[in-house]
Amino acid sequence: MTAVVPTPSRRSVELGPAVELVSKEEGHRQPLAPEFVSQHDFSPLEVAYDFGRVRREDIESGPRNIWRYKKLLPVPSNVEEIPNTEPGCTRLVRADRLAKALGVRRLWIKDDTGNPTHSFKDRVVAVALAAAREFGFDTLACPSTGNLANAVAAAAARAGWRSVVLIPSSLERAKVLTTAVYDGDLIAVDGNYDDVNRLATELAAEHENWAFVNVNVRPYYSEGSKTLAFEVAEQLGWRLPEQIVVPIASGSQLTKVDKGFRELGQLGLVDESPYRVFGAQAAGCSPVSAAFREGHDVVRPVRPDTIARSLAIGNPADGPYVLDTVRRTGGAIEDVTDDEVVEGIRLLARTEGIFTETAGGVTVATAKKLVESGQLDPDAETVLLITGDGLKTLDALGDRIGPKATVQPSVEAVQSALDA
Ligand SMILES: *Cc1c(COP(=O)(O)O)cnc(C)c1O
């Protein structure tokens, strides 16, 4: 009798077109699993696909959320039937008045404040949750600078999962409340984001049923950012913009927007026209911008000190890949002061009626700086990614703005205040 040798027990997963994980440095392949670093070359793992044929009609007939792109994501083929937050299909707004103020010709705002928890993080968390469910996890967790905390707590609530969210104790009150309301386990840690992130990596090793969206299921999570690129291209009538400005925290979003554009080109869904990717950081946390300026390939970690807390990652995991992407496409990276960030928020609000958080202020102010320095071509069609809602960072505006006057309830009083 031959003994049956048990195969290593890893639940077999169905994640649509995703077939394997591949290491970023040496392209070493391994089966799909909740892992994020290659044991072969210690570089980050990325999802590899077998897309088959994908047609525009398949996408256009899909739901009005990111699952219309399910054939391009690591999610099960029945993903739209499973409770999730269904983010995406946010508006792409032609921004003529902001264009005029910046001195550029054709400008678009991708307004991701319209997601379920008001930031682009709903995209990445929805994909992470869909993959984590296939892997058999039952708890959704994260270290967060705020927006991710909101998105994880909300998605877990909707899925009926437990959530464990770790935040720096200094986080803005609005972001604490808008996470706590979903009633998961929210833990404030005395330390900065990089401390919280390290703690999460240790906890992930101890709790095998916890899916830390940006740690052990990071390869799946980060693919969610491609949907920004897919939507921009589809909303432009199936073509790529010539320039795009993307804020940088860990750098994942920027590299995946580029990956999304490339996949659309490879699949013949758009013409493979050239585009340039630009990165935006706050001066108080600008390790990638500094490396770009100095011509380095490595990113030297910094201790963050900026009002743009959602971008305050001092040791960005995808920093070197951001440098590769920006250099390969002929873009640039700049950083702006906190005063410029607030000016950026106000400029977008008064020209386009869109109220963004500090990260969006970084993007707008950086675009302005890139135009002024001649790095952004004013004649090329440009998209700015506005990734989060201003209601979450009201503190950043402080007492700089308010009513023009406080008056008695009379027509004369209002009139004289207006005339003043
Ligand atoms: C997290 C975040 C980003 C960028 O995140 P990456 O880590 O670089 O992918 C941009 N904008 C907002 C509002 C965010 O919360």
Image (cartoon, grey):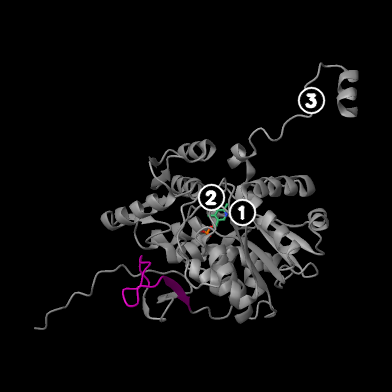
Q: Are there few (<14), some (14-19), or many (20+) residues within 10 Å of tag 2?
A: many
The answer to whether mark 1 and mark 2 are in CB contact below 8 A is yes
Within 8 Å: ligand 1 and the Cβ of disc 2?
Answer: yes
What is the distance, in whole Å, between disc 2 and disc 3 at their CAs? 33 Å
Label ID, residue 55: none
Image depth: mark 1 or mark 2 in front: 2
Identify the element where label 2 is drawn. Answer: helix
What is the distance, in whole Å, between disc 3 and disc 1 at their CAs? 32 Å
Residue under the image location 65 percent in, 81 percent down: 268
Give the position of the N terminus as an image quadrant: bottom left
The mark nearer the N terminus, 2 or 3, is 2
Within 8 Å: ligand 1 and the Cβ of disc 1?
Answer: yes
Q: Tell me the magenta residue range.
A: 32-49
Residue 302 vs 27, above or below: the answer is above
Can the viewer see residue 78?
Answer: no
For badge 3, the amino acid type reads Ala
The answer to whether mark 3 and mark 1 are in CB contact below 8 A is no
Q: Which residue is mark 2?
A: 310
